[in-house]
């Protein structure tokens, strides 16, 4: 079954050339894009959808979320807005509530959050464990997540549970816990930050997870200068996330992981910026402009979680990046689509290999498309906070 989506006034492809097409159309055939080009030359299809002059762009790729949780941290948010500083320890509140919830309730909550994200234009999601923090609970969270989202990351190294010895707990993460979650996850992460895991402990976690065949990610440089970026680069991590506090050496190191300027066929370490979290924690925004100018690659992600960024709206993140972080609309949209795909190593693939790329619109790529109730993507920042998503297709199926 094929669908022609036509009369698209502006189509921001985020393909290899970053093309923006005017008066465009594309054909969705099954899960793939089979044609893209001028609306006047569009081929026939089994069905047609008239975009009526709306803007089109790839579905958002959210490469950093924490969606498997129960409970509420409104009180913590209110206290932070009243002037209390953010610290990593608030995670313990969510751990207690998540452990107490049954599988049915956790799955129901996760499905509802994924549906919210899809309604906002998100067509590909990563999420992490990290609210269980013992072997059985982390394995449960990974299993539930694997049945719902696209990519699952093991984050047993999120926080040392109350009463546990940090070194003993790190051993647990690197051994029995890693073994228990391994069937359900593709990635591993560590919160290398004061109040969480030291650089030495983080190194042990990354080494063990790499030896187990997992791709690596790092929470780093969020609350102050630290070793997160250096460890991510050393281990060849796909991304280092938060990156609020970067030295010149950190920026240079991230830029240096991209061997060929402008070429992503040998990807380096993506700097994932989380602007909604920066607003909620009143941290300085990640230096996205500085990173791009240095030659690094960036992604924008929601960091949807109950404590510091309870939103899955990448449209909001794009608007914030334009209005507060010095990015152009095109750069911000690219970071929230292609950049997220790059951070998840899903930016390549087509009909030839069957592993279709996400985060960009091109023939052979996965048919992930959103239409805005606006003539251009500029309206995402021009009209911040407005419900502009009109229609969404995920892998060729309309989900909104």
Image (cartoon, grey):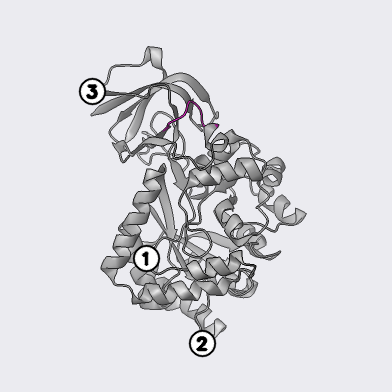
Residue 37 colored magenta?
no
Residue at point 60%, 44% (across, down): 321
Residue 121 visible in the displayed image? yes
Label of residue 163 in the image:
2
Residue matched to label 1: 142
Residue matched to label 3: 46
Looking at the rendering, in which quadrant would you find the N terminus? top left
Is the residue 59 above or below the residue 272 in the image? above
Relative image position of residue 276 (x, y in whole percent) = 55, 53
Distance of mark 3 from mark 1, alpha carbons?
40 Å
Q: Which residues are magenta?
A: 372-378
Residue at point 51%, 64% (across, down): 189
Distance of mark 1 from mark 2, alpha carbons?
24 Å
Residue 259 visible in the displayed image? no
Q: Are marks 3 and 1 in contact (CB under 8 Å)?
A: no
> Of callouts 1 and 2, which one flags the residue occurring earlier in the amino acid sequence?
1
């Amino acid at each position: 079954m094929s669908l022609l989506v036509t009369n698209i006034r502006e189509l921001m492809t985020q393909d290899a050339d970053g093309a923006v097409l005017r008066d465009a159309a594309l054909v969705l055939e099954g899960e793939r894009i089979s044609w893209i080009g001028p609306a006047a030359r569009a081929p026939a299809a089994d069905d047609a959808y008239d975009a009526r002059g709306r803007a089109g762009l790839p579905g958002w790729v959210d490469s950093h979320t924490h969606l498997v949780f129960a409970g509420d941290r409104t009180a913590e948010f209110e206290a932070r807005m009243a002037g209390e500083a953010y610290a990593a320890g608030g995670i313990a509140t969510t751990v207690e509530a998540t452990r107490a919830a049954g599988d049915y309730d956790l799955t129901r909550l996760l499905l509802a959050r994924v549906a919210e994200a899809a309604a906002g234009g998100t067509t590909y999601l990563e999420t992490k464990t990290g609210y269980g923090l013992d072997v059985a609970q982390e394995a449960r969270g990974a299993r539930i997540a694997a049945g719902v989202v696209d990519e699952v990351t093991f984050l047993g190294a999120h926080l040392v549970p109350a009463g546990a010895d940090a070194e003993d707990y790190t051993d647990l993460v690197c051994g029995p816990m890693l073994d228990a979650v391994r069937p359900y996850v593709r990635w591993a992460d560590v919160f290398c930050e004061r109040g969480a895991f030291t650089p030495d402990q983080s190194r042990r976690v990354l080494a063990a997870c790499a030896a187990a065949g997992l791709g690596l990610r790092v929470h780093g440089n969020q609350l102050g200068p630290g070793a997160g970026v250096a460890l991510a680069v050393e281990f060849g991590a796909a991304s280092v996330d938060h990156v609020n506090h970067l030295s010149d050496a950190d920026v240079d190191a991230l830029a240096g992981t991209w061997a060929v300027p402008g070429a992503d066929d040998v990807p380096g370490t993506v700097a994932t910026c989380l602007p909604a979290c920066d607003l909620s924690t009143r941290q300085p925004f990640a230096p996205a402009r500085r990173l791009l100018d240095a030659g690094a690659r960036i992604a924008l992600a929601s960091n949807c979680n109950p404590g510091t960024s309870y939103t899955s709206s990448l449209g909001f993140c794009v608007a914030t990046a334009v209005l507060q972080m010095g990015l152009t609309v095109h750069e911000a949209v690219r970071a929230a689509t292609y950049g997220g795909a790059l951070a998840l190593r899903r930016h390549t693939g087509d009909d030839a290999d069957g592993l279709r790329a996400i985060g960009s619109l091109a023939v052979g790529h996965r048919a992930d498309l959103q239409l805005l109730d606006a003539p251009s993507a500029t309206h995402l920042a021009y009209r911040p906070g407005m419900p502009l998503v009109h229609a969404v297709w995920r892998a060729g199926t309309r989900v909104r």
